[in-house]
Image: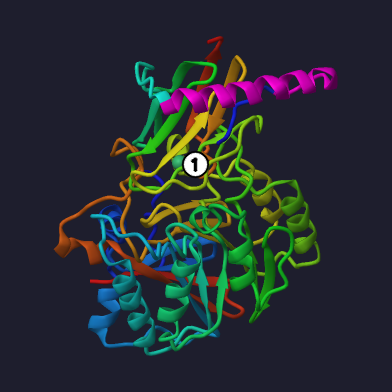
Amino acid sequence: MNTLNPRNKKMALLCAITFLNLSIFAFAGEMKEVDTTGNKQNRIEIKDFAFNPQTLTVKSGEKITWINRDEEPHTVVSVEKQFKKSTALDTDQEFTITAGAPGTYTYFCSVHPKMTGTIVVVKS
Amino acid sequence: MSDYISHDHEHDGIDRRGFLQCMAWAGTGLLWTISGGVLVSRTLAQIAKAGAPLPATDLSFLQISDSHIGFNKDANKDVTATFQIALDRINAMPTPPAFLIHTGDITQLSKPEEFDTFDQVFKSCRTKDVFYVPGEHDVLNDGGKLYRERYLKSVEAKGSGWYSFNKNGVHFIGLVNVLDLQAGGLGQLGDEQLEWLEDDVKGLGADTPIVVFAHIPLWTVYPDWGWGTSDSERALGYLKRFGSVTVLNGHIHQVLQKVEGNVTFHTAMSTAFPQPAPGTAPSPGPMKVPAEKLRSMLGLTSVQYKQGKTALAVVDSNLS
Ligand SMILES: [Cu+2]
C-alpha cells in the first residue's frame, strides 16, 4: 500500500515522519478489518480525460481510490513524487492509496499531462 | 479550418480547395505534392481512374500510425484485423515502398503480448524495413524500455530513442516527444534531444530535404487536448534554413495539414480507430462511428521524393 508523504525538508524530521506513517498504516489496516465503512467514500472518477472531483479533501489514514471510466489508459502520478505512481489504468481499473500526513498533494496523468488533480489531507 | 492550401499549381482542372475542405476530415485518399514549397493535391481515386501508376520516383516510403494493438472497445473491436488490412494494402501497392515509418502507438497498453501480436501480424508485410518512434501508449509503465529493445535495432538511437538517417539524399529525423511529460503540459522533446537535433542538422546543406517524424504533432493542433509539443518551436528553429521540411505525425487519428513557410506539417490516420476533430467532443477519446464507416476513417500515408526536385508527394489513403 502506498502512503502519501509530504516532501521532507529537514533530515531531523525524517525519523519522526517515518514513525508517524507506520502508525497510520497500521491504524488503517486495523480499521479495515473492523470494516468501518461509515467513512466517506474517497473515490475519484477519471472520465472524459479529467479527474472528478478535481480537488478532494480526505483525512489522514483514509483510503483514496481512483477509477478509470474512459476507454483510454490514464495514470495517477504525484507532481512532487510524494507517493508511488499508479501503473497505466485500463478501463474500469482502480488505484488506491492511503492518505498520510496532512498536506496538499498535486498529481497528474503522465499519459495526458493536461489532466491534473489535487488531494488535500487534513488531520484525522 | 483556414490552414488548408488552396493553390493549384498543377493546372489539371481539379478543384483542390473543395477536396481539401471536405476530404481531409473524411479521410479520403489525397495526393499531396510539394512544389516550390507549396502543397497541391489530387485524389487517389483520380489517379486510379486514369489507370496510371504513381509517378516513378527515386524514393517512396509509407507512414503507418496508431495501430493500438490490444484496444478492444466499441470504436473498433478488432484492431488487429484493420491493421492486417493496412498491411494487405501495402502489399498490393504496384510500387512497393522502400521502407515504412511507424509514428507510434503500436500498442494500446505497452504489454509484451500486444507487441508480440503486432510483430506476428507484421510478418505478413512484404516491406520489412520499419523506422519507429514511440507513442505514449508504447511507454506506459517502463519509460519505453521494452519499446527500445524491440524497435530500434536497425538505427543508432540516442537518449530515449531518437535518431536520424539518410536515404536518397533525404535526411530523416525520428524524434521522441512522449516521455517525461510535465504536469499541465504537452508533448515534449527536452533539452538533450534538442541539442542533439541542432548538432545533427548542422552540417547539412540548406537544399537537403528534411523529413521529421514523431508521434505527437510538432505543431499546436489543439492544446486543450494536449495536441501539441511544448518545445517544438525550438526544434523547428533549427530547421528554418532548409528549403523543404516535411513533418509527419500521428496521435490524433485524422488527417490534418498545415504549411508554414518551407515546413509542411501532416498528421496521419490510425489503423485502429478515429478520434474526433479538435473541440468537437467532450474529450479526444476513441470515436465510435457506424461500422460501415469505420474503414473510411482509418488509413495510411504514402510519401514520395523525387531527387533533385525538392518535391515530396504525400498521399493519404483510407482502408475502405
Ligand atoms: Cu490520461
Disc 1: residue Cβ within 8 A of ligand 1's nearest atom? yes
The answer to whether B301 is drawn above or below residue B38 in the figure is: below
Q: Is residue A106 left or right of residue B27?
A: right
In terms of image quadrants, where is residue B170? bottom right
Residue located 29% across and 61% down the image = B27
Residue A113 left/right relative to A81:
left
* Residue ID for mark 1: A75
Position of residue B230 measured from the top left corner of the image (x, y, whole percent): 60, 40
Extreme-right residue of the structure: A12
- Drawn side of residue B38 relative to residue B28, left or right: right
The N terminus of chain A: image quadrant: top right
Task: Give the letter of the chain under mark 1.
Answer: A
On screen, residue B206 above or below A30: below
Q: Residue at x 52, y 85 (%)?
A: B128
Residue B240 pos. (x, y %) = 67, 53
Residue B10 in view here: no
The answer to whether residue B31 of the structure is visible from this angle is: yes
Q: Residue at x 51, y 22 (%)?
A: A118
Q: Which residues are magenta?
A: A7-33
Q: Nearer the viewer, residue A102 or B134?
A: A102
Secondary structure of the residue carrying tag 1 is loop
Q: Main secondary structure of the magenta part?
A: helix
Residue B250 located within the stretch drawn in magenta = no
Q: Position of residue B147 (x, y in %)?
A: 58, 65
The type of residue carrying mark 1 is: Thr
